[in-house]
Amino acid sequence: MLFSYYRRPLFLLLLLYAGGILLFRDFFIKPPEALPFALPRSGVLIEGRVAEYPAAAPGGARFALETSRVYGRPLRTGLMVYARSPAAASYGDRVSFLADLDAPPGASVPGSLDWAEYLLDRGVVAQARARELEISAPANAFIRLARRFRYSAMSAFEAGLPPEAASVLGGVVLGEKKSVPPGLKTAFQDSGAMHLLVASGSNVGFVVAVVYFLCARLGLKKKRSGLAALALAGFYVTAAGMDTPLVRAYIMFSAGLCAWVLRREAGAFHALTAACLLILALWPRYIFDAGFLMSALAAYGLIVGMALWGRYAKKGGLAGYAAGLFLMSFFAQLCLYPLLAVYFHKISLISLVSNMVLVPASGLAMGLGFLLALLSGAGAVFTGLAYVTGHFMEAFIGAVRFFAGLPFSSVSVAEPSSWFVAGFFVLALALLHAPLLGFSSRRLYLVSAFGLLLISAGPLMKVSAAGPVKCRAVLFGDSNTSSALIRVPSGLFLVNPGVNGKKLADSVFTEGSRTLEGIILTSLEEKNFSGLGDLSGSVAIKKVFLPYGPREGGLKKILAGLEKSGARIYRVWPGEVPGPELKVAAGWGGRGAGYSGRGDVLDWEVETVTIRKEGGHAERACSCTECPAPVSVQKGKTVALEFGLPAASCVKPENKDSI
């Protein structure tokens, strides 16, 4: 690995092209074709091709569809189809059906998955509730054969193993992790082994290595062995679902083989560059895809890190083997930490150690899985193999839970700023290339200092920023609860944590914070605090404000736990301010008839922001006397409210959604 690799035309072309996509997104990424009618709409005739393997969904199956015709007229766009029958059609089939179409929902909580935006990034514009699917043309023979292997393997796992072991083995071998129980998924995430449930480059490498070895043992020449390995690896990639990490790895191996056949320099770095360039040329939108970014960065860190640092681990014996595993684990994850913080708000601290055990074990699990799939009809042989595999998978899952259960195995983190992410990557590059730069070289320490400067730039710019302080408020909730997340100068406040607590924690992390200045309850109904317990497990809460009135057992227990962790609980009577230093006050809730003392619905004022419970809306008022009456804001809207300005400089709003 030399610095000259970064001056190669192919790598420079990749940088130029990727930069072009980022700067001119609308030119490179065309939005999917819109439907020619408003949604919702019933009884729409749809024709198209199933674009992925169906996944289990309540009441049937779910899959993405590339449409060819709508109402008999040509229209190429994407739909997310929900079918009643899970076996009605599969990947590659062309189907026709009548469906009810509607728009996908957005994020239920700020910072959580925005399903509508996620689907749009995949080229999907609407959801389709299908009635009866009719296969107009089956997939080609190659895809059908790959499908048969996939379903045969999954059936073999389910027939020979306990449900939990079968679901995990399906993830390790084929990337089918949707049947893994949620609690076990969390254990994989906390132990830093979630990547093992996603079919990736290691799977493709396993197939290539095994097939090449077997062909060589049968006496085939190198070129024919390589071509056979790539052919069967392509078959496996198709059976596993053509996910981005698989495609990236397959193109890398293909590029390396082509270079070897043509007697050109074959290197993993060049193969990775070619794979990324080809994927982005075919699908430019993948530059914004978390799976593609994490796969490419993990491969880059592993390739560069081991090329430059690998020689320091060559000591032989068990110690040398362990050192090599540690370096591989470290460099594969080094560039992923900022992305894990951005996308998942959680980082596994034990992953560097756990992957030294779990990654080699997953290779053995993969081998056992392939054998189970191939020997599914072998009677006693299959039964014996299933017995061995079951016990191995039990130990494998036990190891995952062991690492996940260690104290501080993972930590929840706030979403980092762009300055922090940029500085982290500069430091990562300096560390990766330290042997090349020279440990005593001034360049190494200058680059590292620049990275630290970028990391500190974010907080410094916040402190030195001039201009008025801004208040942000986001309204959200469900059919039962109205909630709000409010940013004011004194901190972050959450009104009515009555939805999923983990999603609420994500909303706090998305604001770049791990602390809530205060929780506010507009009433003592359970619907307004049902998510508070889970939320307090991930986010530090300083204060809780609630009305007087009887507190049922669940709320008492939650408040007692918060007090033990240092939170202060304030029970507030309407019109009362808890303390001169606290800019939170309760109001009468517009009732007019007084307060009953039973936890009635209250209005609250947080500094200059007024929360009024009126039909699921909230209202906000500027401290400026020149401003009009409190502005009503619809659910899901984000409002930037500037306050603390002189009255003469306050600009009146042009509409109710912005100030």
Image (cartoon, rainbow, N blue to C red):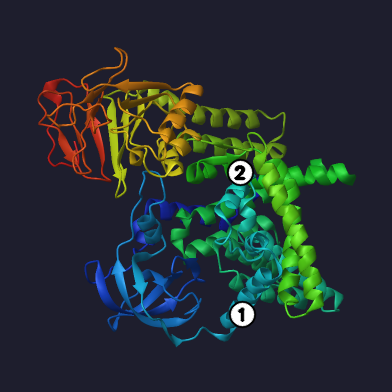
- Name the residue at the top extreme: 580
Above or below 598: residue 183: below
Cα–Cα span, label 2 and label 1: 34 Å
Left or right of 380? Residue 349 is left
Above or below 282: residue 218: below
Where residue 211 sits: x, y (%)? Answer: 76, 72
Q: Is residue 608 visible?
A: no
Secondary structure category for the residue under label 1 = helix
Above or below 633: residue 103: below
Residue at left offset 45%, top offset 51%: 19
Location of the C terminus by quadrant is top left
Q: Earlier in the sequence, mark 2 or mark 1?
A: 1
| Residue in the foreground of this view, choosing between 257 and 511 | 511
Q: Amino acid at mark 2?
A: Asp
Q: Amino acid at mark 1?
A: Arg
Residue at left offset 63%, top offset 36%: 430
Left or right of 191? Residue 86 is left
Q: Which mark is residue 190?
A: 2
- Which residue has dot 1 on it? 148
Where residue 138 sits: x, y (%)? Answer: 49, 86
Left or right of 320? Residue 60 is left
Q: Residues within 10 Å of mark 2 (few under 14, many from 20)?
A: many
